[in-house]
Image: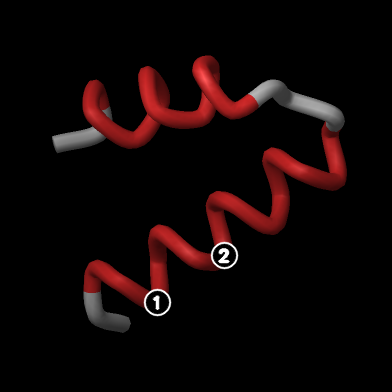
Amino acid sequence: MDQSLFNEICLQQLRLSGVHEGETVAVLTTGD
């Protein structure tokens, strides 16, 4: 699975969980 697809899945899961945009960015940046 490539990184961009992985990020898209993460974003979808976070949206379903009701996570706000700022928190989403923090999660993706710490995931490096």
Q: Residue at x 40, y 77 (%)?
A: 5
Q: Is residue 32 left or right of residue 21?
A: left
Q: Residue at x 69, y 57 (%)?
A: 12
Residue 1 location (% of width, % of height)? 31, 82
What colour scheme was applied to this rendering of the protein? secondary structure
Residue at image x 51%, y 29%?
24
Quarter of the image that includes the C terminus: top left
The residue singled out by tag 1 in the image is 5
Image coords of residue 9 (percent x, y): 57, 65
Measure how far apart labels 2 and 1 are at the Cα level: 6 Å
Where residue 8 sits in the image (x, y, percent)?
A: 50, 66
Q: Residues within 10 Å of mark 2 (few under 14, many from 20)?
A: few
**On screen, 13 above or below 14?**
below
Q: Secondary structure at mark 1?
A: helix
Q: Nearer the viewer, residue 19 or 6?
A: 19
User: Does the residue at mark 2 contact the one at mark 1 (Cβ under 8 Å)?
Assistant: yes
Q: Which residue is mark 2?
A: 9
Q: Amino acid at mark 1?
A: Leu
In front of the other: 23 or 9: 23
Residue at the extreme bottom: 1
Q: Is residue 31 left or right of residue 5?
A: left
Residue displayed at 59% across by 28% down = 21
- Pick the front one: 12 or 20: 20
Indicate the position of residue 4 as horizontal and vertical percent values: 30, 72
Residue 2: name its quadrant.
bottom left
Can you say whether 11 is above or below 20 in the image? below
Amino acid under label 2? Ile
Task: Please identify the quarter of the rendering in which residue 31 is found.
Answer: top left
Q: Residue furthest front?
A: 21
